[in-house]
Image (cartoon, rainbow, N blue to C red):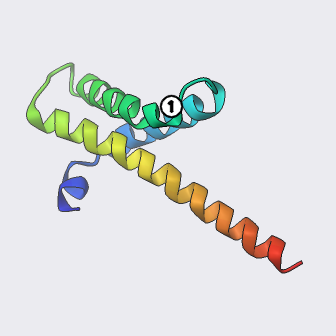
Amino acid sequence: MEIMEQYAIPIVMGICFGLGFVLKHAITKLPNNWIPALLVAIGVIVNSWLEAWTFTPEILIGGIASGLLSVGLFETAKTLIDRVKNTFSSKE
């Protein structure tokens, strides 16, 4: 977990999160299991772009970590929203 905290880049995570949301909801023919792999690749490319197109192991790890964390953030938010909906719908 420390590696993720050390290498996570919030800007890259935000871009990956937004693109992941678009991929999931706009391109319905894309299988869901491809989205994390695409976000890892996008994270590496965006991180390299932010660092003036340089490529080092730190940039690679930062892009991978940020792409995967954006997937985890999306799944966590989706789970929390579903739980809140289920809680309020079961009380009625």
The quarter of the picture where the C terminus appears is: bottom right
Using residue 17 as the reference point, say whether residue 13 is left or right of it.
left
Along the viewing direction, whichever of 52 and 75 lies nearer the viewer = 75
Residue 45, position in %: x, y? 29, 24
Using residue 19 as the reference point, say whether residue 4 is left or right of it.
left
Q: Residues within 10 Å of mark 1 (few under 14, many from 20)?
A: some
Along the viewing direction, whichever of 81 and 34 lies nearer the viewer = 34
Secondary element type, mark 1: helix
Q: Residue at x 58, y 31 (%)?
A: 22
Using residue 19 as the reference point, say whether residue 70 is left or right of it.
left
Q: Amino acid at mark 1?
A: Leu
Which image quarter: residue 56? top left
Along the viewing direction, whichever of 90 and 53 lies nearer the viewer = 90
Residue 57, position in %: x, y? 10, 34
Residue marked by disc 1: 19
Q: Residue at x 33, y 34 (%)?
A: 40
Which image quarter: residue 44? top left
The quarter of the picture where the N terminus appears is: bottom left
Residue 70, position in %: x, y? 42, 46
* Residue projecting furthest to the right: 92
Which image quarter: residue 91? bottom right
Q: In this picture, is 92 found above or below 74?
A: below
